[in-house]
Image (cartoon, rainbow, N blue to C red):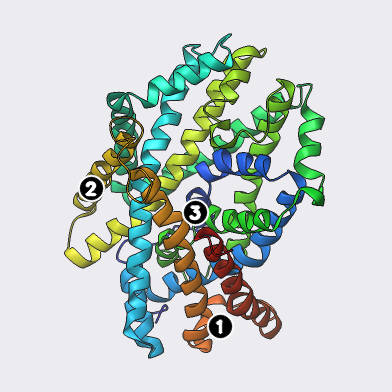
Amino acid sequence: MADEKKSQQGEWSSRFAFILAATGSAVGLGNIWKFPYITGENGGGAFVLVYLLCVLLIGIPLMMAETMLGRRSKENPIHTMEILTAEAGADKNWHYLGWMGVTAGFLILSYYSVIAGWASAYVVKAFFGNFSGANPSEIKAIFDSFVASPMQLLFWHSLFMLATMLIVARGIEKGFEKSVGFLLPWLFALMILMVGYAMTTDGYFKGLNFLFRPDFSKLTADSVLVAMGQAFFSLSLGMGSIMVYGAYLPKDVSIAKSSMIIAGADTIVALLAGIIIFPIVFSNGLHPNSGPGLVFETLPIAFGNMFGGWLVGVLFFIALVFAALSSSIALIEPAVAWLIENKGFSRAKACLWSGLVAWLLGFGTVFSFNAWKNAKLFDRTFFELVDYLTANLMLPIGGFCIAVFAGWIMKQEHSKAELDLPGEHLSYAVWKFLVCYIAPAAVFLVFLNVVGVL
């Protein structure tokens, strides 16, 4: 089937283009913002080791499975599951997996754009020296004042969403490939430059020791589950992005090799973020377990009081914006592809409507930090509720179902043909074991953890 058909949206011009785009989808706020602070909260090196094992044993097999499903059908995630369900002679309800992925990615984009807007605003704040010489209470006041202003948050949210829509409207080669081809190399260059700065700090070796020397006494069962969840979510699995990118993948590109390169690049960015952040934290007497505020409330203290902190701060937040933008274009694409293929929209019109709806939904996140911060449902603000629904429920369920469908429902001859693994029987058997048993069990444990059963 895959040999006879091409996606209506076109195809990646090369394997390298696909790897760049999928890496851009995976690399985002989760790598540079979330990975360092959860590593800090969970004791450092031992947590990193578990995280790396989870990427290898869970993340890569699931990425191969999701990419395979997309390339097999050459359609958007919703149509993909309809086509492959019919092909496998399976229960028609499996097509809801496609709907869940597209919906999850779309909902994530609605608040992702708001948080990315914070990073955009902090580029400007760092550039104009707002953090220079500031103490912790002043930095906190800057952040509190910023998020308390709906108009400021709406402005930056709108600017970031507009940039996302303009890139996606240009299509695969002119939009995705060119933008990610620019963003990712600059992201890596900026991060390498900041690693160079981190090497000059007094806390460099202390930061490396914290990040890479395992202390298993600090590792708990909950830490293992957090590492598992971070490995899964960091690779953008279960939200339709990798599936739709797989639909644009030419038949002669190796899914296995591409998945390993993408997972490797994604992991390198996360580790670079740790190598940058922890030396700065330790050099300035700050705490690595500062939680989600590490980037927006803790690091600006360091940037404002270190030699060369103005430049380091500007570069850091530019890198954060680049990472966020490369992910946001992947989050909106599944919805755009569905509107084009199912409703006959032009790409520009599909981008306009998708972006407009996501932008309007983002108002709920904007107001969650000011006007609606006391309005709660199930003891959560609008932002907290959407974040919990997507990251803690929809994505784990989606990942579990992808593993089950690819490993147990899809016909073996079809998955073998798509994966075309070297060594044939042995390598395929290893992938099959991981995707049939290890990945579903691990994702199920994550799901039990986030719903409070474990």
296, above or below 381, in the image: above
Q: Nearest the camera: 168 or 268?
A: 268
201, above or below 133, in the image: below
| Residue furthest bottom in the image | 89
> Where is residue 122 drawn, in percent x and y?
46, 24
Mark 3 or mark 1: name the one nearer the start of the chain.
Answer: 3
| Residue furthest top in the image | 133
Badge nearest the viewer, 3 or 2: 2
131, above or below 340, in the image: above
Q: The residue tagged with tag 2: helix, strand or loop?
A: helix
Question: Mark 3 sits on what residue?
Answer: 17
* Quadrant of res 372: top left
Identify residue type, mark 3: Ala
Question: Mark 2 sits on what residue?
Answer: 357
Residue at 41% over, 88% down: 88
Q: Quadrant of the C terminus?
A: bottom right
* Quadrant of res 54: bottom right
Q: The residue tagged with tag 3: helix, strand or loop?
A: helix
Residue at 46% over, 74% down: 401
Mark 3 or mark 2: name the one nearer the start of the chain.
Answer: 3
Identify residue type, mark 1: Lys
Residue 74 visible in the current orientation: no
Q: Nearest the camera: 449 or 296?
A: 449
Q: Are marks 3 and 1 in contact (CB under 8 Å)?
A: no
Whole-angstrom CA distance, mark 3 to mark 2, is: 29 Å
Mark 1 is surrounded, within 10 Å at the Cα level, by few (under 14), some (14 to 19) or many (20 or more) other residues, namely some
The numbered dot on residue 416 is 1
